Amino acid sequence: MTVTRRGVLIGGAATTAVAAIPADPPGGGAAAARPPQMPVRLEVNGERRELMMDTRTTLLDALREHLHLTGTKKGCDHGQCGACTVLVEGRRINSCLSLAVQHEGDRITTIEGLGTPERLHPMQAAFVKHDGFQCGYCTPGQICSAVAVLDEIARGVPSHVQADVVAPPRPSNAELRERMSGNICRCGAYSNIADAISEVAGVPS
């Protein structure tokens, strides 16, 4: 039998096409197996919530897609911009990097839980006063992070700008800017954001 270049190419193409056909899932059904589901109990903004969800669901998607709390924003979805910042047990996290099932029983606060239009949280009021937002997309994460920053300083958590990491941190402008550096504002409203946080912290901007 004579082997030709054309025959080799045709045979290779046929083999590739057959390999690309997906095999039936176990059991012979056409539909893919359902992903594993798990019950999750959370306390969100003071309210107990029970969900049944895919174990791969991030806390961000649980809040936005399952609980319809869309104040928390999905920005980079890689934990780099801070738009998805929420408070878990009083401490800030990037909710896009955390699975919902990791937070069984945890107390979670989103921007909706900090204040209302009629009764703003002091940090929300300061952001309004100092125009600490432009498009506003990053603002919920900025505010949640700022609230956590002041709590960190009150608890004595040190930062990179401290000359003495053993000494109690002071809420200086440089200190606040360093601690907020994980929250990106693409509009560039950083000076106004710093002024708002400084006012709540009780220090000169």
Image (tube, helix red, strand yellow):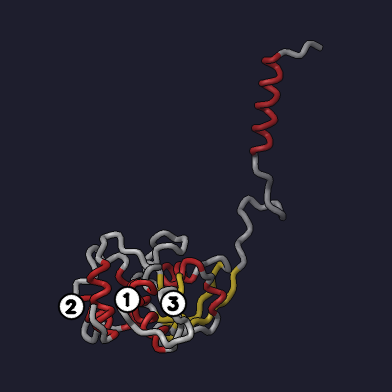
Disc 1 is placed on an element classified as helix
Image mark for residue 159 = 3
Residue 43 in view of the camera = no
Can residue 147 be seen here? yes
Residue 143, labelled with which disc?
1
Mark 3 vs mark 1, CA separation in Å: 19 Å
- Residue type at numbered disc 1: Ile
Q: Is residue 201 above or below residue 139?
A: below
Instruction: Give residue 179's quadrant in the image.
Output: bottom left
Q: Is residue 13 left or right of residue 56?
A: right
Q: Residue at x 69, y 26 (%)?
A: 12
* Residue 48 image position (x, y, % from top left): 46, 86
Q: Who's the residue at 67% across and 21% down the image?
A: 10
Q: Position of residue 168 (x, y in %)?
A: 42, 88
Q: Name the residue tied to disc 2.
A: 129
**From the viewer's perspective, is 76 left or right of 103?**
left
